[in-house]
Amino acid sequence: MSGLLALLDDVAAIAKVAASSVDDIAAAAAKAGSKAAGVVIDDAAVTPKYVTGFSAERELPIIWRISLGSLKNKLILLLPGLLLLEQFLPQAITPLLMIGGAYLCFEGAEKVFHKLFPHGDDTVEKDFETGDPAHLEEEKVAGAIKTDFILSAEIMTIALAEIPQSNLWTEAITLAVVGILITVVVYGAVALIVKMDDIGLHLAKTGRTGAGRAIGRGLVTGMPKLLAVLSTVGTLAMLWVGGSIVVHGLEVLGWPWLGHLIHDWALAVAHLVPQATGFVEWLAKAAMDGVIGLALGIVLIPVATRIILPAYAMVTGKKTADH
């Protein structure tokens, strides 16, 4: 009997450890996921454009294919690669984060540039003129998965940097949880967004009440505005997150003056509004990080479009669209 009680005590102890591990993983995943929120917003804002121009019945299958590609990017390619880097070359994590942050700054600044100086993309226009919808779909899915790889790399690297030091398996499970949850949230939101106008159209035509039909018409007319707002929020998030990553990376690498300057200015602004000091400080810091991100991105636009992309085209033999 005493042996059975001892066994039950051991089982209870193991259960407590397991429960504690689950709690630790959940807490770490929540922290890491929230830190990557800016990139997640941009991911959700970017993806709907890849189903634009296709028939309604192809929208969800395309999103499903992209989401599977995103999971492959995160779980099969990025997760083991990042864990290997952390184990054998941890000093590379911060520079990689900064490269990803610089890319976000470039993308955000480029979107601002396109907004201020709009122009068509000849490559995209030629794609939509093709007479082979299946070929066009393959191209769009492949392009979306490539874009997702870059955003997923940034999400997973940010997540890894935010996970407290622990054993390899806990870190791997936490990263996997973050990757899966973010993929579900992003592509679930994208699916809802791209089908919302169809739902609205259905309600407008078949709604049994005037209120239902009015809601349907509101969804149809409101979705373009929502997409525009989402795109703007995504651009601001890219500049904020990219700028903050670069500033923090400089601090880690031994150049803390810019981060300290932003911190001091944010505190000074926050003291002007004592009723909401914490929020104002965060908002001021985010705004300054975003300005830094925009400035860096503007500098990188000619570097990327005139040097990096032509060099890539020369090495690979592939033509790249001029941004």
Image (spheres, rainbow, N blue to C red):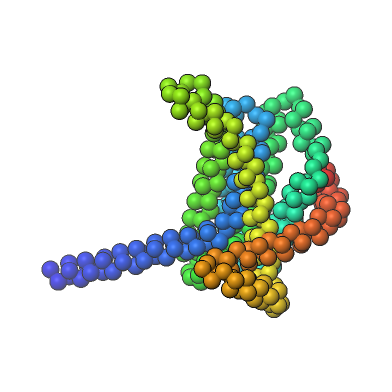
- Examine the rendered structure and indicate whether residue 243 appears above or below residue 53: below
- Examine the rendered structure and indicate whether residue 176 appears above or below residue 199: below
Please name whichever residue, 166 or 210, is drawn nearer the observer in this view of the structure: 210
Q: How many marks?
A: 0
Look at 51% across and 24% down and name the residue there: 204
Please name whichever residue, 13 or 186, is drawn nearer the observer in this view of the structure: 186
Q: Position of residue 11 (x, y in %)?
A: 26, 65
Look at 30% across and 64% down and name the residue there: 15
Q: Where is residue 172 in the image (x, y as percent from the top left)?
A: 51, 61
- Examine the rendered structure and indicate whether residue 50 appears above or below residue 316: above
Please name whichever residue, 225 or 180, is drawn nearer the observer in this view of the structure: 225
Q: Is residue 172 left or right of residue 290?
A: left
Q: Can residue 49 be seen in this view?
A: yes
Q: In this view, does 190 lie to the left or right of 295?
A: left
Look at 81% across and 55% down and name the residue there: 301
Q: Position of residue 91 (x, y in %)?
A: 65, 72
Q: Quadrant of residue 251?
A: bottom right
Q: In this view, does 301 lie to the left or right of 234?
A: right
Q: Quadrant of residue 130?
A: top right
If the image is split into quadrants, where does the N terminus sit?
bottom left
Q: Position of residue 195 (x, y in %)?
A: 55, 33
- Examine the rendered structure and indicate whether residue 214 appears above or below residue 158: above
Q: Can residue 77 be seen in this view?
A: no
Look at 74% across and 59% down and name the residue there: 294
